């Protein structure tokens, strides 16, 4: 295939959402290619979505898909996943660093040390990042949210239309398309101050330029600096955990005829941070070891993430069918330094005594170059049989260098010898054929079936030197090559019944998988040379009920079987992937949106997620089933209100107040001596924003995030506790109270 060129009021964040907040909009199941929900006067029943790659009313979609529109992102003053996760169904996360996140949907994760993603991550229709653990596939870059059309979250496995890794679901960032109809633009300036930190700010601009009747250009630029708020007084460091973003985006649309168009897109983003936003906590009492926002690391821990992507999208209306082609090439790079002084001092000190105790760091640098091509054909019209079929090809090449260094030595050596350095080139190639078909048995009843066949081919090579790689001859490289070939099928089955135009009932059965692959080999031995794919089945029932044009109520319940789970086991300081245990997830989700008064709208969402290992996992030290999966809260709740008002004939405004609740979660597993447990406390944050808009296009928006300055425990890492159970736990904290203002002008 290589020559063939062919993504407290209760507890946490697993909610469905559909709401029109005055001039904003938050729509469950809204994957609309056009965005009528951005108009507050558009009714819920009129929203058109394409979650199934076809246009249909949001009310009719048989499944849980949510979207937050660009207008709502703007009113929330959302800058990253952290800011909108509480309003997105089933999403939780670990803030690995200010530059990246590990995203979780419906509890499908093995925790903070997970190496490969269990969700699909897309920019428009292009999967971004690596699909393997060798290119830091589990780390999702924080995509800039300015001038987006919407962010979509598709819950449950999306294995037929979105391919591998989408076990828990899919997260998509949808950009705005150039508009042929007229010139428009926006410029905004932001300034803010964060408690325990410093001032920050941003400059953002977008412009839509029609170049002719058939040609239009849209350009976006952004520079953003979010201040750090963590200090390290022991080493005289302040304001750690900052995030500095530069982003540029351009799209050129050529509409040759009403039936044929080509859109060329370019995206570039670079994120830098001076350290992790973590505070050291006692593993038992959760009390700060020093100050509330203090840490102590011997070494600096900077990180950097880059994404460069170019794509060409062809849409061709063939009248009897619609043809879409998406060709893309991307380059991702992730660099980071992590202080592992305690971990490697424990490992090497046990063998070497006091001489083995040093300030060690783990430096990683992974670059992935990936080409993808998707072609799909969808039937036109609303006949008795509707279908979509296509093919997908991905070819990625990753170069990764991982080095364990002694920061007390200019060369990073110990006793004049390298400790451990690995050069890890790898390739991954996938080819898939997929199809969905819907048979309308009557105007009220239809059935959808879908399937995807994927062939995967991976090659992973390693060249390692150093004391922990080859203790007998540390300067002699140990070479290894592993291969993996898989043929995997995934399926979809939906039944939908619409007794009235206001009611939709559905059942959904879908499967997903994550590819297996080879492991890193060292001279000290490994747990296994390869690991297998893990698989998941989701069974779901749901009800969608429109409330006479004033809102909606949606209910869903699901059961997930997850088998042969890919887990991480650290052996002699080297992470290995192993298959250990099965899991079951039972959940229910509810959302209610209602316009109480002509100018007042209320949204309430909640969910229940019970995610546990259903078998023992002895390799993790878990000899009995029942351990709770990491990072996902059992209960979740979110509440938001929006009130529209008029100041004068030329000025109107909107006041938004929202409560975001994150329930208690685990880092690690209860009872494990490998993935140690740290119970993350539940917390609530309240945000308030106000927007004043003039008819001349000016807008001023003061805001307060985290009004009550809550120190929420977002995530934690217990890697060190495997070696020293009493060691302090680095806990990522929520951003302290931040006061700011955004001034913008639209034209």
Image (cartoon, rainbow, N blue to C red):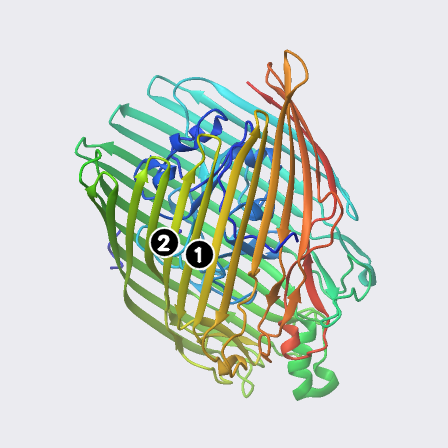
The answer to whether mark 2 and mark 1 are in CB contact below 8 A is no
Q: Nearer the viewer, residue 126 or 661?
A: 661
Which residue is located at x 72 percent, y 74 percent?
727
Q: Nearer the viewer, residue 424 or 339?
A: 339
User: In the drawing, does residue 600 fall left or right of residue 464?
Assistant: right
Which residue is located at x 60 percent, y 71 percent?
404
In which quadrant of the rendered image does the N terminus lie?
Answer: bottom left
C-alpha distance separating marks 2 and 1 = 9 Å
Which residue carries the number 1 mark?
119
Which residue is located at x 40 percent, y 43 percent?
544
SS for callout 2: loop
Q: Quadrant of residue 720?
A: bottom right
Name the spot of residue 313 as percent of width and height, x first: 33, 37
Which residue carries the number 2 mark?
158
User: In the drawing, does residue 448 fall left or right of residue 146?
Assistant: left
User: In the drawing, does residue 282 fall left or right of residue 602?
Assistant: right
In which quadrant of the rendered image does the C terminus lie?
Answer: top right
Identify whether 45 is placed above or below 444. Answer: above
**Disc 2 or 1, which lies upstream in sequence?**
1
Which residue is located at x 41 percent, y 68 percent?
562
Identify whether 120 is placed above or below 220. Answer: below
Q: Quadrant of residue 2?
A: bottom left
Identify whether 574 is placed above or below 523. Answer: above
Q: Which mark is residue 222?
A: none
């Amino acid at each position: 295939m290589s020559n063939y060129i062919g993504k407290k009021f209760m507890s946490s964040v697993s909610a469905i959402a559909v709401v029109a907040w005055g001039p904003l909009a938050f729509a469950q199941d809204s994957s609309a290619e056009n965005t009528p929900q951005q108009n507050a006067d558009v009714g819920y029943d009129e929203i058109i979505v394409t979650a199934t790659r076809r246009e249909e009313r949001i009310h009719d979609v048989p499944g849980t898909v949510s979207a937050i529109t660009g207008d709502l992102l703007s009113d929330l003053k959302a800058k990253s996943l952290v800011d909108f996760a509480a309003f997105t169904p089933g999403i939780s996360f670990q803030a690995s660093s200010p530059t990246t996140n590990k995203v979780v949907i419906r509890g499908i994760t093995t925790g903070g040390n997970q190496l490969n993603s269990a969700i699909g991550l897309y920019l428009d229709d292009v999967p971004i990042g690596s699909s393997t653990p060798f290119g830091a596939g589990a780390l999702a870059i924080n995509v800039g949210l300015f001038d987006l059309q919407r962010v979509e979250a598709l819950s449950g496995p999306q294995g037929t239309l979105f391919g591998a890794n989408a076990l828990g679901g899919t997260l998509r960032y949808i950009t705005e398309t150039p508009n042929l109809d007229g010139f428009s633009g926006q410029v905004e300036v932001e300034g803010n101050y964060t408690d325990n930190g410093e001032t920050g700010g941003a400059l953002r601009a977008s412009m839509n330029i029609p170049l002719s009747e058939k040609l239009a250009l849209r350009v976006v630029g952004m520079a953003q600096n979010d201040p750090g708020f963590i200090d390290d007084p022991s080493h005289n460091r302040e304001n750690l955990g900052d995030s500095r973003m530069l982003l540029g985006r351009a799209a050129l649309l050529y509409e040759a005829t009403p039936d044929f168009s080509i859109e060329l897109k370019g995206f570039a983003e670079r994120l830098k941070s001076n350290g992790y936003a973590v505070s050291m906590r006692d593993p038992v009492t959760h009390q700060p070891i020093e100050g509330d926002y203090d840490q102590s690391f011997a070494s600096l821990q900077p990180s950097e993430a880059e994404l460069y992507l170019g794509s060409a999208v062809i849409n061709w209306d063939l009248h009897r069918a619609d043809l879409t082609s998406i060709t893309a090439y991307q380059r991702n790079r992730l660099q980071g330094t992590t202080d592992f002084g305690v971990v490697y001092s424990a490992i090497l000190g046990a063998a070497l005594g006091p001489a083995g105790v040093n300030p060690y760091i783990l430096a990683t640098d992974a670059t992935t170059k990936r080409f993808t091509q998707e072609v799909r054909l969808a039937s036109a019209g609303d006949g008795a049989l509707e279908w979509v079929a296509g093919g997908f090809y991905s070819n990625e090449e990753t170069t990764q260098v991982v080095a364990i260094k002694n920061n007390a030595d200019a060369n990073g050596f110990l006793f004049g010898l390298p400790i451990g350095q690995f050069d890890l080139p790898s390739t991954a190639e996938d080819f898939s054929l997929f199809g969905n078909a819907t048979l309308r048995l009557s105007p009220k009843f239809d059935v959808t079936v879908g399937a995807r066949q994927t062939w995967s081919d991976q090659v992973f090579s390693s060249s390692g030197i150093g004391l922990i790689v080859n203790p007998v001859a540390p300067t002699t490289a140990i070479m290894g090559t592993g291969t993996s070939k898989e043929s995997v099928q995934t399926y979809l089955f939906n039944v939908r019944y619409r007794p009235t135009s206001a009611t939709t009932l559905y059942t959904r059965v879908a499967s997903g998988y994550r590819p297996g692959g080879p492991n890193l080999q060292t001279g000290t031995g490994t747990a296994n040379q390869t690991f297998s794919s893990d698989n998941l089945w989701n069974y779901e029932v749901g009800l969608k009920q429109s409330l006479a044009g004033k809102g909606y109520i949606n209910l869903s319940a699901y059961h997930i079987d997850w088998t042969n789970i890919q887990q991480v086991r650290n052996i002699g300081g080297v992470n290995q992937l192993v298959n250990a245990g099965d899991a079951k997830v039972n959940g229910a989700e509810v959302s209610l949106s209602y316009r109480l008064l002509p100018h007042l709208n209320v949204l309430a969402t909640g969910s229940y997620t019970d995610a546990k290992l259903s078998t023992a996992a002895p390799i993790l030290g878990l000899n009995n089933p029942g351990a709770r999966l990491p990072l996902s809260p059992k209960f979740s709740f979110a509440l938001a209100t929006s009130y529209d008002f008029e100041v004068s004939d030329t000025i109107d405004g909107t006041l938004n107040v929202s409560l975001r609740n994150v329930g208690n979660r685990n880092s690690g597993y209860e009872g494990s001596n490998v993935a140690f447990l740290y119970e993350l406390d539940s917390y609530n944050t309240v945000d308030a924003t106000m927007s004043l808009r003039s008819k001349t296009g000016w807008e001023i928006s003061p805001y307060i995030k985290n009004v009550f300055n809550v120190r929420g425990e977002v995530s934690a890492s217990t890697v060190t506790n495997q070696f020293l159970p009493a060691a302090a736990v680095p806990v990522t904290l929520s951003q302290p109270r931040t006061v700011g203002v955004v001034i913008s002008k639209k034209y």
